[in-house]
Every structure is written in structure tokens, then in C-alpha cells.
Image (spheres, coloured by chain):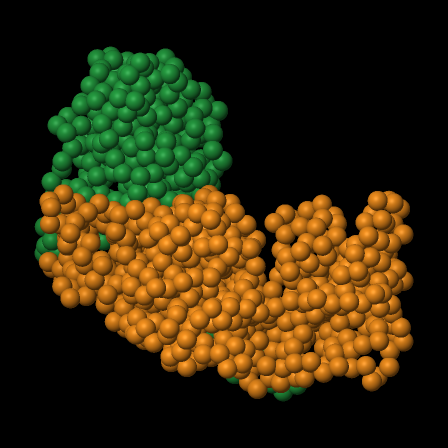
Amino acid sequence: MFGLKNECVLGYEEEYRTIEDYQGRIVRWCPGCGDNGILSAVQRLCRDEQLSPEKTVFVSGIGCAARLPHYMSTYGFHGLHGRALVTAQGVKIRRPDLKVFVNMGDGDCCSIGTAHWIHSVRLNMDMVAMLHDNNIYGLTKNQASPTTPTGRKTATTPRGTPLRPLNPLTTTLGVTNASFVAQVVEWLPELLYNVIRQAYHHKGFAFIRILQRCPHFMPDLFTSLLDDPSRLLLLRHENGIQVSDAMGRILKTQEEHDPSDLHRARELAESQERVPVGILYRNESVARYEDLRRPARVPTWEDRQRLLENTFDKFGIFPNGHEVTTGATQKE
Amino acid sequence: MQAASAQPREASPGDTARVEEHIVEIISDSGEGAQTAGQMFGTISAKMGNSVWTVEIIPAEIEPPARSTAGASGNRIRLGSFPITNAGDEADIVVAFNDQVLIGREKAGEFKPGCTILLDNVWKDHADPAVASQYAETVADFIDRGYRVIEVPMEEECRKHMENPRRGKNMFVVGMLCYIYVRDVSLVHGEIKFKFRHKGEKVIAPNVKLLEAGYAWAGQNLGFRFEVPLIGVAEPEVVFNGNTAIALGVVAAGMDVCAMYPITPATSASHYLSEIFDEVGGVVHQAEDEIAACAFAIGASYAGKCAVTITSGPGLALKTELQALSVMGEVPLVLVDVQRGGPSTGLPTKVEQGDLLAACFGTPGDAPKIVMAPATIEDCFYSIITARKIAETFRTLVLVLTDANLATGQQAFPRPHFNKEWLAPPIDQSPVPRDKDPYDWDPRTGLSQRFIPGQPGGMHTLTGLAHTRDSRVAYEPGANQEGCRHRSLKLAAFQKTLKPPQVYGDAEGELLVVGWGSTKGAIEEAVDRARRDGLKVSSLHIKFLQPMASGIREILQRFDRVTTVEINYSDSLDDDLIDEDNRRYANLAWLLRARYLVDVDCWSNVHGQPMKPGAIGKMIRSKLAAD
């Protein structure tokens, strides 16, 4: 077949992983929950990139979104509320071979885990961070989150939320070392997939805010965007999202935006009229913390012995009078 | 009581007195180098062959106002002709850079009655009359109360050799002490060279000059010397403080990742580790907060070798939820708590042992974990190696409780012989057989193999939720019971490996003093003294506090009375409202009473000071006298 040896082709077919190979436990999200779309896009990415399940780790916090790792067949770490990003940093620091993904809700990322979010941007470790932003606490049943729109009645704000919502995009774009910031909606699978895929290929901390429907507590939240896709502003660029014909027919409002333009990215993020989707900012030149902290070579146990013996010399007291050896010479 | 100050006079060689031990305190305002002087004098004494324990006196602020009574910064050096295991009782000689720092230390009961005080007299003719009169009053008051105050023209003498005497006075002090204790000055030259090796000859030369000036001045003006007979150094030793021991323990344990957030008094462990860890490919990650540090360490552990996070009480509190995650997910983790005074921000630079119950039980829900406490500086080093092994073998959290006393105390101990086994074997990453569960709990021990990312066939999602053997989130009634049972069984399995602790002194008697952590040396010294006087007292020191070894009950039962000695708060029955129904016991006493149903008493305080053997001895005598 195609001039290839049969056994190679057969081997390929054996090793080739399908979407089913990335599926984990039975999904328990509500019907119509936007998390389902995110899961599908992620599984498709794994399939298309043929990620090795044992070398892939999905890290999450607590909340509806945080259940995602259970629905994958890779390694997963379903840790503590707000602490997904810091746990993921620990996973990555000495394991450059692992592909790390983080899934968080808006409570997880923008409320209890805010400090970690800010510092994760600054560390710029190589991972994809997905903020499933449905503007509400779902799992704890309908409390206002930092991204809940003003005036929204929730269980904790029966007379409406008093504050303006926090803007995750401007926040991220304001942090030193921001290297990849994107926004997308989960109900446009092609666009969602494209953005996640570009995030995956970014070498550094790729932050995606995904607007996600919560049919249970926020059924009306995105209706205006769903009814009128022209309210979405598609950011297209040869270095960003390239628009297919189908996509172009749905998202007619477009802007040519160079993802290296931080100033414009911040303006777009701030925009009240339209919801930008696509890649707002990308900078591949920001150093990654794991690289900055990586040892020049892999030390051996002999190195440990040498270091300890040298240190014992330095702090040593020796029986034969007052002879003190200090520093680097190791006598054997 | 002495009526007058003993003023400098010509020395005669016959004035050298032989003493078994002496305690020297050097105290100054912050930044005047008293700590350096103390460490240097301690090191020289250790190298010459005295047994030495030094401990830092640290104010809470970096530069508290000058001449403040509570702002004393410095070092206490105890040197002896027998093995010294603790900071001892009150000081025999005090070197003070000003009169005010004396007041606070004296009030704290740190000076032996009638002890010698060498005081810088620069304040006598100070331009500010208030300072001059404070000085005169303090000197008069101390003399009045029987102290032997010697006014030393430290600044004046130093100015002869250095433009800014404030920066070199400490070497003058080392010189004086070298004369007083008949130390080998050439040895000090070496120390000065080493200390200022990065600064070069222009700093070394004047310091050597000041050292010699101090020595000469003392020779000409002090009429006394002390000889603390040397016991020699039989085998190679090392001398450093407990925090350095922890840092070296992390290296020796073969760990690669230490995540931390700055907190007193734990941070210096990370300082030292940061200096050396690169050489062996390690990383000290300074996280944005205590929680992040712990989560980072857990993430690193989950993906490979066991990691460590080092903190103090307030940090331990912040790491509570993550401790439970480590236990629940069975991710190995070593957590070092260098205890300080609490509660809340408490006494950041002072010693306390107030975190034991928080360490054992401070996690909501049932989170069985291992708690151990090194008792000496040597023990700090080895405990980290042990802790990693336990953490990985039992897939659990190991808490190592040290304290500010161990953290800043320095003591020589036999040089460790490097052992490759310290480093722990590489983690098993072979493919996982089909159908093997990530929590394949052994029904008897609760133990299971840990799968790490990269291991084919081991894929699963670790979760902090209640889960089944295959790491499935489980809400059914039996599942959480099963998980909790297996995690608890691991502690029992570990407990079966522990040897019963050894009684110090006779195996039975009238009083048993039980301690844990840094108080060991002081307790045993107090017991020794009491036993020399014929008192039937022994002591027991417990290293593994959760779980505790078998055999402790039997030991407790062989004594008429049992009391713990701890540096933490307990109620006193002398208070009007306190009775046996509401008395709050010291940490270890609670544990012993609850487990062994023995009427264990406690003797504890939270003065923020190391326990003194003399004070423990007094307690022992009063308890036995009450019989």
C-alpha cells in the first residue's frame, strides 16, 4: 500500500489512537453543558497530535470544569479548589517530557486561585490553561463568581451582583511575561479546536478563556451571542486563526489582528461592544521557568557525594590538630 | 554582693581558673556583628577540642531601634569539657556592646548571679546626656545587684585601628575572649580569612589587627582567665546549625525539588539549600505563597521523586488543605515545620513546640500522617533522609517538626559517612500490568504501588475526592470507609517497624520526664544532675509522635509519676479557675494521656526560650519533694 511495507502500515494502525482511546469515564455533566464541547475539542487534539496517554497530564481544581481529567484516559490530577495551576507547575518543573493541560472554572481561576493565576502567567511554564468561564459557581449551586455580570441575581446576590465583573483577558494581558492569551466560545467547535491547538503548540503558558454555557444556572447568559454571532469579533491573522469558509459564513465580523500587537490586544480585551474570539496575543520569545531552572546537565549521585563531602569539609573539625580543609578539594 | 565594680587591672599568670564549662553571651544592637563574633568564637573552641553549643539571640526586627532593651542581637556560646547537648543555664560572662541590651537579657533570667559583664564604655561620655545617664544608671544598678561590671573602652581601642569601629568591634571582642579562654589566636586568623574570603585582604587585615588588639588589651587589663579543659576531637566532626542540617539532609536524601515561601525561622534552610542545590540539579522554588509552595511540591512529587516544603507554624496552617490532599491522594511529601512561638504571628524568632497537635490532628477529616521530631542537630540531617524514605514507602505525608532552637543552634557531631542508599532507589517506571489499580490497597497493610506519569498502563486521575481502588470518584457508603481504613492501616504498618524508645536512666523509678524535639539535651542533663544527687528520675524522648512506638505504655507504667517537659502552653493548677476538669495540658501530655490512660502531668512554658537544664532540675526536685 502506497509503497510502504505491510508490517509498517499494520504497526501504524495498531499504534494509531482514535478519539475513543482518549475517552475516560462516563461523562456526568448536565445535558447541554458547555464543558462537553471543550472535552470533545481536547480529545480531538489528543488524537490529531497522537499524544501518548501516559505522557499527558490533565490537572484540575474543583468545580464542574475540574471533572474533565476523569473523562480522559490520560494521567490526571483532580486536586484542590484554586490550586490546579500551582500543582501543574510542580508536575512540569522536572518533567519537560510531559504535556500538561489545566482545566479550571471561573471560581477556581479568578477567585480562590487568583494569586496562582497571576504568578503562573509570570512563570510562563509550558502548559495549556483553559478557563471554563460560565460566569457562575455551578457545582456549589448558583453563587456569583468574579465574572458574573453586574446585577445578576444569584443565590448569594438575591438583589443582583453589585460589582462589575472581573475581566480575565485584561488581567492576564496585564501580567509580566504573558505569552499567549486567547478567547473562544465552546459552541463553535472548529474555532474552539483551532484555538486549543494553537495553544498546545505555543511554547509557554497558553491561557484560553473559553466562554462556556451553563444551561442549568445561566441558561440565558450567551443567548444574545448565540442569536447574533455578529457580536463576536473574529480575530484573524496569518499568525493567528485562519478562517475557513464555513467559519467565515458564521462569523462575519472580523478583524485582522496581529497577535504580536500587545497594545491592540489590550484594547480588544477591554472592548465592551464586541466579544473578541481568536488569539489576542502571542509571544514565543518569553523564557520559560522550567528552562531557566533546568540543570545544565543531569547530575549523578557522585555529584551529590562530592557536594556533601565538600560541605562537610567546609564545616569540618578534624582530630589531627587544627588542620582545616575548606572548599572544593575532595580527598578520596 | 559585691560593692564595687571590678575595674581593669594588670593580669598575673596565676589568675587562670579551671572550669568544667562556661557560658558566654555576646549581645549588641542588630548589625554590630555579635552573632558573627559568637559563631567564630564557638567554632574556634570546637576546633580546639571543647564541646560547644551555640545559639543565636535574634530580635524580631532587622534593625530595631538602637539601644533597645528588647532588641538584643547576638550569640550564646556554651563550651565544656564534657559533651554539651544544649544551651545550658545562665551566662558566666557577658560581653555587651551597650547597657540597654543587658537589661532585657537580665530580666529574662539569662545571667548567672554575680556574673562578669564586659561592657563597652563608649556611652559613658555620650554627647546625649540622656544616653550617658542611662548608661551610668544601668552600670550602677547592675553593680548594686552584685554583677561584676567591667567597663571596656572597646570603641576607643578599635578606633586606633579602624575608622568606623562599629564595624570591627566584634573582632576586638573575639580577641578578648580568646585571651580569657586561652584560645589559639592563629586559629582565629584562619576563621577570619575564611569568613571574609570573598572580600579580600583589605577587609581581612584590619579584622586580624582588631582581633590582636582585643587579645592584647585583655592581657594587659583583665586580671582573670579561664581554662575549660579540652576534651579533644576523637574523630572528624562537622559543625553547623539545624537549618543547614535540614538543607544538607535534603541533598543527602536525593530529593530534587524544595518549594517554599519565606518565613522565619524556617527560611535559612532554604537559603543554604538555594546556594548549593544547583550543583546537584536541584531547584528551590520560591512560590507566591505557602499554599502554592505546598501544591508545587505535591505536583512535583506526583510526577516523580518525593519533594519537600519547609515552613513554620503560620505556613503549616496555610498548608492544611494540601496536607490532606497529600494523604488522600497518597502522594508522598516531606513537610518540615521549624516551629516558632504562636499562636498567629506569635514570636517569629523564638522557640516553641506548639505545633504538635496541629501537626497530628490539624487536618479536617481523617488524615493519618506521620509526625516525627528530631532532637538534635545531627538528627535534623538524618531525619530528612528517613522522612523521604517513609514518605515514598508508605505513600504518605511525613511531617518533620524542628524548632527555632535547633534551627539556629550549632553543635558539632560526627561527620556523616556518605551512603549511596540515602538517595533512595530510582522510582519504578515499568509498565503497569493490565487491571492493576492505582490504589491496589493491600488488605493487611493498606500499601499500594504508586504510578507516576510516563508509566505506561498506569493512567488514572488522582483525586482528592473519596475514591475507589481504581481512583473513581465514589459516593457510595462503603467507599469512603474503605479508603480511610486503608490509609489508616498504613500508619499501623509503619508503626510495626518502630523500635520502642530507650529510657535514659533507670528503667523504673519515682519520676519519668518525657520530652520530644529540641529539649532532649536539657532534659537529659537535668536528669543526670538529679541522679547524681540520688534522685530516682529517668527520662524518655519520643521521636516518632504519630504513630508512637509500642512499649511506651509499659515504660510509663514503671514510674510512680510521669511528666512531660515541653515548650508550649499549658494551664497551671495554681490559677484560681483551673482544675482537673478544665486544665489544658501541654501537647505531648494530651497525646500520652489519651493513648495510654496514664495520669501524665506536664511542665511547660512559652517564654520563647530554650529549656534550661537548671530549671528542669528544679521542677524535678520539687515534684519529688512533693511526695
Chain in orange?
B
Front-most of A210 and A234?
A210
Compare residues B327 and B339 and report the one nearer the observer: B339
Q: Which chain is green?
A: A
Total number of numbered discs in the rendering: 0
**Residue A256 image-quadrant placement:** top left
Q: Nearer the viewer, residue A184 or A211?
A: A211
Residue B230 visible somewhere in the drawing = yes
Q: Residue at x 47, y 61 (%)?
A: B603
Q: Quadrant of residue A311?
A: bottom right
Q: Is residue A104 above or below residue A184?
A: below
- Residue B168 image offset from top left, x and y in percent: 79, 61
Q: Taking the image as drawn, is residue A274 in sight?
A: no
| The N terminus of chain B: image quadrant | bottom right
In the image, what residue occupies the spot 29% across and 28% down? A133
Q: What percent of the width, then of the height, locates residue A285? A: 46, 40
> Foreground: B23 or B626?
B626
Q: Residue A189: horizontal and vertical position, in percent?
A: 21, 28
Rendered view: B556 above or below A257: below
Residue B517 at x, y percent in the picture: 45, 65
Classify residue B452 as left or right of residue B152. Answer: left
Viewed as shown, does residue B98 lie left or right of B279? right
Q: Quadrant of the C terminus of chain B?
A: bottom left
Residue at 88% x, 60% y is B156
Residue located at (32% from left, 35% from top): A108
